[in-house]
Each structure stands twice: as C-alpha cells, then as structure tokens.
Amino acid sequence: MNWEKIKKTLGPGILFASTAIGVSHLVQSTRAGANYGFALLIFIIAANVLKFPFFEFAARYASATGETLIDGYKKLGKFAIWLYFIITICSMFFVSAAVVLVTAGFMDNLFGLSELWSHFQLFPVALVFVVTVGLLLSGKFNFLDHLIKIIGTTLLVSTLVVFIMTLLKGPATHVPDFTPPAIFEESSLLFIIALMGWMPTALDMSTWVSLWAVEKMRSTNYHPSLKESLIDFNLGYWISAFLSVCFVTLGAYLIYGTGRSLPTGSVGFADSVIKLYTTTMGNWSYIIIGTAAFSIMFGTCIGLFDGYARTLERTTTLIFAKKSQPIKNSRTVYIWSLVLLALGSFSINAFFSGQFKTLIDLATTISFLIAPLVAIANFKLVSNKYIAKSFIPGKLMTFISYLGIVFLTGFAVFYIYVMFL
C-alpha cells in the first residue's frame, strides 16, 4: 500500500469519527454507564455493528462513482431525494441545537462565561454558533480536515489513558442499599432508543461521509481506490465505536451504584464528565481534560454545521436547479444554509432553555425513527444497478445489512407502539 496515496485519502473517516464522538459518547454513553452500569452495553455494540454497513456504503458509493449519496438518492427517484430533503430540514435544527448546547456547556465550564454574562444566559450558546459559522465561512476544507485530526487525537489519547487507569483501579464501591434500575420499564426503553439513535451518530448523516470524500477528492485531485477509501472510513468508524465502550466504562466504574448521579444541566454535566477523568488522573489534569473535551465537542459542531450546510447545498442544487439554468453559485446556498441552521437551532435552544436532558433525548429519538428509511436507501444504492460489480459489498456485509434494517425498523415500530398506542 502506497503511504503517499493513503495520506491523500485519510480525512473523511477521521472527520466522521470526530463528529460522532460528541453527544453520543460524552453524554449518552456516559449516562448509560452511570445509570445502568454495563447493562446497556449490548445495545451500544448492536447499534455500532448493525449500523456499520449503511455508513460504509457512503464511502463505497463515493469511491465507486465519484458522487455523493445525495446524488444517488436522486437516481432512486424524485420521491427519495425530496424525502431526504424533508427529513434533513425536520431534524437538523433539533440535532444542531442539542450538540451546540453540550458544546456550550463544556465551554462555559471551562471559561465561566455564564458568570461574566449572567444577564444573558444563552451567551455561551450564541458564542458557539457565531464562532462555528465564522470558521466555516472562511471556506477552508483543508483547515477543517487538519483541525479535526488534531482535536480527535487529543481526546483519543486522553480517553485511552483514563480508560486503562480506570480498569486497573477497578469500580467504585456501591452504596449498601443500591438497587439496579429496571431495564424493561418504559423510561429505560425510551432511553435505550435515544441512546441507539446517535450511536455512533445519526444514520441520516451517512451522506456526509460521501460529501467529505468527494470534497477530499476535489481538494487533492486524487480519486482513491475502494481499498484506500475503506481504510480511511474503517479507521474512523471503529475508533468511534471503541470510544463509546470507554465512556460506558467510565460511567459504570466511577458513578454507577455509588449514590451519585449526573447533573441534568449542560454546565453541571460537563463538569461531572471532566471529573470522571480527574478522579483517575488527579486534579492536575482538569484543565487538560476540560480543554480536550471542549475541543472534541467544538470539532463536532464544526463537522455538524459543515455537514448540514453541504447537504442542503447539494440537495437544493439537485432538486431545484434546471439543466438549462443551473445554480451558478452553490457557495451562496452553503452560506445561507449555515445562517438558517444557526438561527433555527438557536431558537430551539431558547425554547428548550434549561431542559438539557429533554432536548438531547428528543434529538436522538428523531434520528432513530428516520434511520430505517436511510438504511434502505443506502442499501439499494450499492446494488449492481447503481455501481460496478467490483464495488458491490460481499455476502457478510449484505447479511448484516438485512439484520440492520430489521433491527432499526423493529425498534422504530416499538417506539411508536409504546408512545402512541
């Protein structure tokens, strides 16, 4: 394998991992471990394994065609791309609002901004929006590519160190009257669905893997082979999957059964997560871990906003542009998409002010409910009707895909049954 070619390929998979290692890991996985110990680990592993093909198909399709999955959706028919466009519009504000709220919590915990701006409680949230949009308006994909690699490496190393030290130290002592929570009661089942909704991230974001892959090809002027593309993607995906297990372990070893609980506010939650690290490494590490955690959440914000803006740019072009009158400046669509996303998401944050847990669970649940539709569409696009035979997934991947579609559909139907029937 030519290392120079690999270097030209690496990026989209790492960008995907850094976008995934945000709310699903720092928040949901930690909550799972803190509240249920290792009881929910099987659901996290199942979500990572059974969603894998549908994310991998994005990298596969981009390598096979040089196009994004969104272009593929148009080939499935107008209904498919319109449905994806509507799904994106309906979910993006809630998802972005949730991620920004967590990011603002870590930033506020690190810099104490809410104390300085006590008359404007949403100042940290507004600041995250402004800085994120400002960086993306600079239009430097290479900057985003390099920044995410640095941020992701920092948190990866620190998390692995704490994970190993926590395993060596062993779990905290349980309180004498501790009773494990029931997994199969309604509140627990709803949390499980929310947990899997963003594990490792929302399935409708699979298009972003192809968007970033195509942009990487354009910026490097190099079209990687399927093997090279999958090395990049698999590296990012399975690092993300492994880190989800690390965060469950931290919650299970350091909080579960101790009588302590994670705060429901974003700032308090951020402080508790950082203290999971300092409990093991010592108070001296607080500022280092706090910076790393904020950085990864900020990296998630950047990746999220860029992904949604690129999605709106591409879907708008494919739906509304005419061959005789193509959209001349898609960059304008990208810019207005960022502005729209920021304003809409900030409005959601204002409406759900003080309801950190509610907003997170709502956003993750929405993602899980729309996942079966995305899974089916992605699976169809890697058939021999749309890509060359040499790019078609093998029998094992096809088998896991069928299992994944049944898994996602079954839980979505179950959720609807519990909530509305």
Image (tube, rainbow, N blue to C red):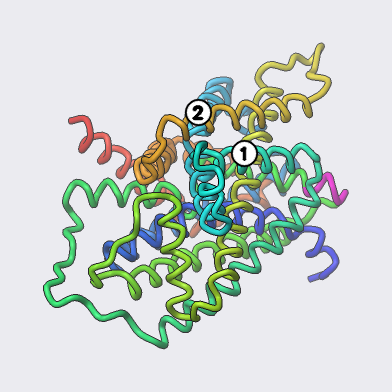
Task: Kindly identify which numbered label has been placed on residue 142.
Answer: none
Residue at left offset 78%, top offset 46%: 141
Comes first in the chain, label 1 or label 2:
1
Label 1 belongs to which residue?
129
What residue is drawn where x is 65% and y is 68%? Answer: 153
Specify the amino acid type for callout 2. Ser
Mark 1 belongs to which amino acid? Answer: Phe
**Residue 47 or 31: which is nearer the viewer?**
31
243 is within the stretch colored magenta:
no
Secondary structure of residue under mark 1: helix
Would you say 391 lies left or right of 40 here?
right
Residue receiving disc 2: 347
Secondary structure at numbered mark 2: helix
- Name the outermost residue toward the right: 221
Q: Quadrant of residue 382?
A: top right
Where is residue 358 shown, x and y percent of the image? Answer: 34, 41
Locate the N terminus by quadrant.
bottom right
Say left or right for 290 vs 335.
left
| Residue 399 seen | no
Q: Is the residue marked by circle 2 packed among few (<14), some (14-19), or many (20+) residues within 10 Å?
A: some
Residue at 29% from the left image edge and 68% from the top image edge? 37
3D distance between C-alphas at marks 1 and 2: 12 Å
Residue 291 in view here: yes
Q: Residue furthest top?
A: 324
What span is in magenta?
A: 216-221
Which residue is rendered at x = 66% and y = 34% of the image? 309
